[in-house]
Image: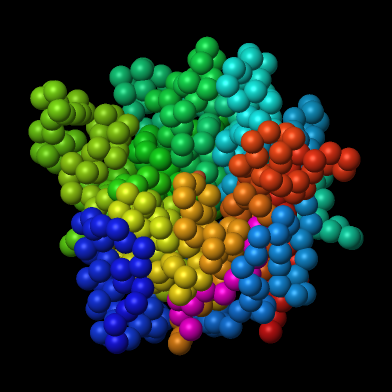
Amino acid sequence: MTNPQRTQGRADSSPWHRLLDRQLTRRGALGTVAATAAAAALPLTLGDAGAVSNNGAPILADPQALPPRSVPPFRAIAPGNADTLTLPFGYRWQTLAPWGEVFTADGREIGFNHDFVGYFPLDLLEGGRSSTDALLTINHEYVNALFVGGDTKNRTKQQIEAEMKAVGVSVVRVRREEGGWKIVPDPRNRRIDALTEIELTGPARGSAAVKGATTVRGSVGNCSGGQTPWGTLLTCEENVDGYAKAWAGSGYEALHQGWVTEIDPFDPAWTPKKRTAMGRFRHENVAVTVAKDGRVVGYMGDDMQDACVYKFVSRGRYEPGNRQANRDLLTEGDLYVANFGNGSWVLLDYEKNARLRDAKGADGKPLFAGQADVLADARASALTVGGTPVDRPEDIEIHPRSGEVYVALTNNTKHGNYFGQIVKFREDGDDAAAQKFLWEVFAVGGPQSGFASPDNLVFDPHGNLWMVTDNSDLVSNPIKAFHGNNAMFFFPTEGPRAGRAHRFATGPVDAELTGPVWSPDGRTLFLSVQHPGEDSESLEALTSTFAAKPGTRIPRPTLVAIEGFPGWGGA
Ligand code: FEO
Ligand code: CA
Ligand code: CA
Ligand code: CA
């Protein structure tokens, strides 16, 4: 059997595409590798049943947790171009936290362009898993200057300040009440924005690589993220370079951005921390788990064409219940980059790797003077030591039953890959701290499979994968004809239907669906609708009016709550 998807949309080849082709040829010969059986039982070494991921699944893979259920709980919808959020029959959505909504006692507003959403059950620290009362964290990735300030070229000081306050993160208490979800007043409701004081931690703190800083202003480019087993948010700073120009005169410093920032939604008095040990690049996300020996592991993607996949392994060990100690775990550890050629993790350590010490730039000068430099330009370090440049790694998630790590590779127009793919790998010995891994292709985008440009991923506890697409930035977009607006898909990961895409939702015009997260009972899916109407050329020529305030037409990015699911126990 040949695989017709193999060369779809490829104009040329790259080392990554040669590896992909090899995998897909093997897949063609073997039938479907995605249909391999679920994992053999993995030992749960920590016995910490309380630690759950943001979708309510255990942090440690557990094949016994819930049986696979690979039939979608909905009738798939067709592609569409409507200016609304379209869902299958029997499902409904409500606007929950739109841009501009005042939600704190001191009058702060929900920010712009929602992305990652963290779900923190309100009773989490008491061991609870409330599905009706929670602190949500919402990333606000960037602003559309046309909608936030009006002038996209000559920003005033006031406009720059408004933009700096419209990005970052919102911590919002929400509750399911009669009639739907509502934002409720809470002393923990707050904004972290481009002006908030944040502490640098780890090897780059105070170094020349960050211009000697130990505290910095703000977190920007907040794309996707992750949640830790101890109940904090990791927000990932992705596209941070453009602000030096857009916010000229504001004191913005790009070297202070592009990190992973840890925020405690339960403790506003705890200063947010940038984790320099996790490297600086275009951080899309971090998927957190615990290795067999208790060290904390985070998988991360650098969302850029021909950039790499990383793994951070903490020095210290996770202590269930010891939140105070766990909050320091990400300060020190080892950063690795993935070599997909031989399935190995390569350590990015200046002292231990001569290639980093010997690396020279085009001018013949050393690229790195020490570990702080290695971390602050992790991309250059990764390519120096043989990290495999891949096709824009976006979200990464860990399968709740098998422990396999799924990576969304959005696309790479540089090599003619318009449709992207999802790959997955399994760590040696099923240990997240392993040095080797085995990878394979899970699903390939294109007209045949029906999806393109996979971005955010989230699993349900049965092990089904839910994915949202990002076709937004393709200049001459060859996708729209078969794909329609950006959408959300369901993929079984086990059984004969593994890897098949089923469309669950289609977003409004010029929007991207982002940040999907479940309530622990699986009855509510929180979803961000990002940048509706983004391609509007003026306020008079809007391409979308999605979620506009009554009586107005300007579209609003918003968080929505989707209901109609049977829940994890349902049919
Ligand atoms: Fe912000 Fe890579 O998406
Ligand atoms: Ca993304
Ligand atoms: Ca995710
Ligand atoms: Ca994206």
Considering the image in quadrants, where does the C terminus appear?
Answer: bottom right
Residue that appears at 41% across and 40% down: 282
Residue 240 can be seen, yes or no: yes
Residue that appears at 74% across and 49% down: 546
Count of marks overlaid on the render = 0
Q: Which residues are magenta?
A: 497-507
Where 187 falls versus 406 (above or below)? above
Where 24 falls versus 297 (above or below)? below
The location of residue 522, given as percent across then percent down, is: 67, 69
- Quarter assignment of residue 204: top left
**Does 428 appear in magenta?**
no
Residue that appears at 22% across and 47% down: 347
- Quarter assignment of residue 342: bottom left
- Determine whether, in the image, residue 324 is placed left or right of residue 363: right
Residue 331 can be seen, yes or no: no
**Does 503 appear in magenta?**
yes
The location of residue 119, given as percent across then percent down, is: 64, 53
Structure colour scheme: rainbow
Considering the image in quadrants, where does the N terminus appear?
Answer: bottom left
Residue that appears at 40% across and 69% down: 444
- Determine whether, in the image, residue 563 is placed left or right of residue 1: right
The location of residue 114, given as percent across then percent down, is: 63, 44
Q: Nearer the viewer, residue 299 or 125?
A: 299
Q: Nearer the viewer, residue 549 or 413?
A: 413
The location of residue 152, given as percent across then percent down, is: 60, 25
Q: Nearer the viewer, residue 159 or 271?
A: 159
